[in-house]
Image: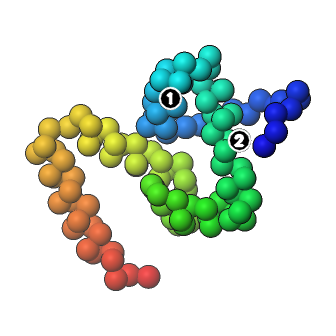
Amino acid sequence: MGTSKLSHQVNVRLSPAAYERIKQLAKAERRDSLGEVVRVLVDWILPQLGEFGTLASLSAVAPGKRYSRRVSADLQDKLHSALDVIFEHAPSRIIEDVEQLLIQRAGKYRGEK
């Protein structure tokens, strides 16, 4: 996307993990603001979106988290963020407990439609 003299401000909610990653990028790239990093990312992703047509199509081939249409993206982001915190900071015993719980629940619902 070309740079334009006219710009618009957009407020977005980010998961804690995404916010921290953008802060890291801003620091590593010596950018003046987080907004500048987000602008660069948006300028990069919009042409990619044009190629795929929809966010759902783009998400289907993109690495990373997948989103279900059954549950709001906000709730899914909260759950992913909570797991990120557990993976980063919890003792291994807690991680093992979470693993067992998730495997049990996934097994219970795997065959349901």
Quadrant, the C terminus = bottom left
Amino acid type, label 1: Leu
Query: Residue at left 53%, top 24%?
Result: 29
The answer to the question of whether label 2 and label 1 lie on touching residues, with beta carbons closer than 8 A, is no
Is label 1 in a helix, a strand or a loop? Answer: helix
Q: Label 2 vs label 1: CA separation?
A: 16 Å
x and y, in percent, of residue 97 in the image: 16, 52
x and y, in percent, of residue 58 in the image: 61, 62
The reply to whether residue 71 is in sight is no
**In the image, 89: left or right of 9?**
left
Amino acid type, label 2: Asp
Query: Residue at left 54%, top 48%?
Result: 74
**Is residue 28 shown above or below 103?**
above
**Is residue 46 shown above or below 111?**
above
Is label 2 in a helix, a strand or a loop? Answer: helix
**CA neighbours of label 2 inside 10 A, class few (<14), some (14 to 19), many (20+):** some
Quadrant, the N terminus = top right
Q: Which residue was labeled with disc 2?
A: 43
- Dividing the picture into quadrants, the one containing residue 42 is top right
**Is residue 54 shown above or below 38?**
below
x and y, in percent, of residue 41 in the image: 63, 39
Query: Residue at left 88%, top 27%?
Result: 5
- Dividing the picture into quadrants, the one containing residue 65 is bottom left
**In the image, 100: left or right of 62?**
left
Q: Which residue was labeled with disc 1?
A: 25
Query: Residue at left 21%, top 52%?
Result: 98
Of 85 and 47, nearer the camera is: 47
- Dividing the picture into quadrants, the one containing residue 16 is top left
Of 34 and 105, nearer the camera is: 34
